[in-house]
Image (cartoon, rainbow, N blue to C red):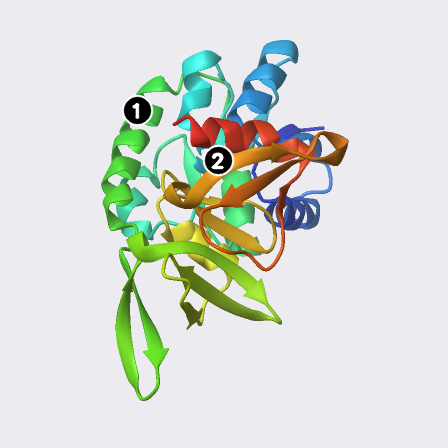
């Protein structure tokens, strides 16, 4: 039985990937779903190396390449990314594969088939090349949204956005001037387009801007509340599992 590990900070994305894996090959056992750099480093230090790792490139607390700086992962890695295929085209024939989000069944089956016959080896050189490619992609983070205002579309700079939230099934961006703008994309799509150094997916309802954070408050059950410098309709609660992530993000 092939043993795999998933490194993915979005719970629903990880659950969807697990379902796709089961459908593609029921013999693959997912040993763990790891949500952060720290959790991943701790797991790989204390467990035998699995046969295969599915790894999201951008985690809430930074680039997953930071994991390789702390531990030696010698098994094959299938990276997942929301970046366009052109940035990673050169890696189709390499022993490190990638899946573009949203992941589809055909691509997953292709990647699994490719890795079944590989033996564990040192992928350092390929990881370094892929990391350099991702740095190119980082320059493509969204700087402006085109938002409707009366009978026009106006540019809204991401630098002017304090937070983005879901309200009554509508996605809205709120500026530092406390003005509301409605967006036609989901929070998942927006989180992939915004620079993770500047914006953080706090929970299922909120994406927050780093410079809008005033402070963090302790909350029940080892949770935390993020306090922003702008008015909020409700508390932004950080789950216990993500407390270390938001602290790392604030300290980046």
Residue at the disc numbered 2? 78
The furthest residue to the right: 221
The furthest residue to the bottom: 151
Of badges 1 and 2, the one in the foreground is 1
Q: Does 3 appear above or below 180?
A: above
Q: Are marks 1 and 2 in contact (CB under 8 Å)?
A: no
x then y, percent, for residue 68? 43, 19
Quadrant placement of the C terminus:
top left
Label 1 crowd bin: few (<14), some (14–19), many (20+), radius 10 Å: few
- The image quarter in which residue 48 lies: top right
Please state if 250 lies on the left or on the right of 4 as rendered. left
What residue sits 30% from the left and 50% below the top?
Answer: 141
Decide which of 109, 19 is in the foreground and name it. 19
Q: Does 162 appear above or below 5?
A: below
Decide which of 76, 189 is in the foreground and name it. 189
Residue at the disc numbered 1? 128
Can residue 43 be seen at all in this image of the molecule? yes
What residue sits 35% from the left and 86% below the top?
Answer: 150
Can residue 63 be seen at all in this image of the molecule? no
What residue sits 50% from the left and 42% below the top?
Answer: 111
The secondary element bearing badge 1 is classed as helix
Label 2 crowd bin: few (<14), some (14–19), many (20+), radius 10 Å: many
x then y, percent, for residue 207? 49, 51
Measured Cα–Cα span from mark 1 to mark 2: 15 Å
| Res 46 label | none
x then y, percent, for residue 239? 66, 38
The secondary element bearing badge 2 is classed as strand
Decide which of 145, 218 is in the foreground and name it. 218
């Amino acid at each position: 039985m092939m043993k795999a590990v998933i490194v993915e900070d979005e719970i629903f994305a990880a659950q969807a990937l697990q379902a796709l894996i089961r459908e593609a090959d029921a013999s693959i056992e997912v040993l763990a779903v790891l949500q952060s750099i720290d959790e991943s480093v701790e797991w790989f230090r204390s467990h035998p190396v699995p046969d295969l790792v599915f790894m999201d490139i951008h985690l809430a607390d930074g680039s997953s390449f930071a994991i390789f700086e702390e531990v030696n992962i010698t098994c094959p890695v299938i990276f997942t990314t929301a970046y366009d295929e052109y940035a990673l085209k050169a890696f189709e024939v390499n022993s490190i594969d990638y899946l573009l989000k949203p992941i589809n069944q055909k691509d997953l089956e292709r990647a699994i088939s490719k890795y079944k016959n590989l033996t564990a080896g040192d992928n350092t050189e390929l990881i370094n090349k892929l990391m350099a490619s991702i740095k190119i992609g980082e320059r493509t983070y969204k700087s402006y949204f085109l938002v409707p205002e009366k009978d026009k579309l106006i540019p809204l700079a991401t630098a002017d956005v304090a937070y983005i939230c879901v309200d009554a099934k509508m996605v809205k961006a709120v500026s530092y001037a406390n003005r509301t703008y409605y967006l036609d994309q989901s929070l998942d799509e927006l989180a992939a387009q915004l620079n993770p150094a500047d914006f953080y997916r706090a929970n299922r309802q909120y994406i927050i801007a780093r410079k809008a954070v005033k402070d963090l408050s302790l909350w029940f059950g080892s949770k935390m509340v993020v306090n922003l410098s702008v008015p909020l309709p409700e508390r932004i609660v950080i789950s216990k599992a993500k407390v270390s992530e938001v602290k790392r993000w604030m300290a980046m």
